Amino acid sequence: MSEPNSAMVQISITRPRLLDYLESEAVAASSWSDWDTLFDRCWWSKGPAERSRLLAGVDGRLADACYRTLMRSLLTIPLGCPRFSYNDESGTLLLSNLGLGEGVDDYVFFLATVRALASYMEDGDEGFAVIRNYLWGDRYTLACLCIAPGISRFVDPQDDEYKVLIEKADAFFDLWYELPGPNDPEDWEPSASQRALDAAVFENLNNLR
């Protein structure tokens, strides 16, 4: 049985700056030089040539696309249960998908899409992104990314900040998905309210104009 990993991002950002981000052309994943941190956490032991080829492939997926289009693609992954919302009062963007996938290229694609938000944030904004085996028993974390104005960085698992962000991510998943527990995800069926949230994701994204 496959065990797709889950992903979420939470960012504080003003609506005008978020709109600028959504309509901007994507930056290549290879613009960031720290992907080895993710590759190592994924036990992806390929050499530099294979890693460069993977990044080139992700760059191709990002090329000539705006971030609105890329966000939409993150919400249409068939494994599913996407969530997307923007709260004008708090200025908080939330995006998640319980079934991001199992491919390292999918993780790079997700993180490259959301870490670009750092360029549109201003002083006082903050955020983070997590890719985690939330649905299954071990809940292993593949990536924990701190996103702040002008910078995004992988958080070391030994840092106190790492534990805080993982706890926030799990609280987010628990609240939005109401899962019965980490050991029996195949038995989970979304409630009517959950299905309504699924149906609203594209409306929520399209309403950001």
Image (cartoon, helix red, strand yellow):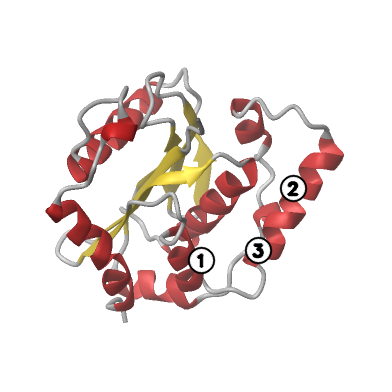
Tell me where residue 209 sits by quadrant: bottom left
Amino acid carrying mark 2 in the image: Leu
For the residue pair 206 and 103, the one nearer the viewer reads as: 103
For the residue pair 115 and 106, the one nearer the viewer reads as: 106
Q: Are there few (<14), some (14-19), or many (20+) residues within 10 Å of tag 2? A: some
Q: Position of residue 72 (x, y in %)?
A: 44, 67
Tell me where residue 170 sits by quadrant: top left
**Looking at the picture, does residue 57 appear above or below residue 166?**
below
Q: Position of residue 164 (x, y in %)?
A: 31, 28
Q: Position of residue 193 (x, y in %)?
A: 13, 54
Image disc number at residue 70: 1
Q: Are there few (<14), some (14-19), or many (20+) residues within 10 Å of tag 1? A: many
Please give the name of the residue rendered at 74% of the width and 27% of the height, measured from the top-left corner. 45
Image disc number at residue 54: 2
SS category of the residue bearing label 3? helix
Image disc number at residue 61: 3
Please give the name of the residue rendered at 76% of the width and 55% of the height, measured from the top-left corner. 56
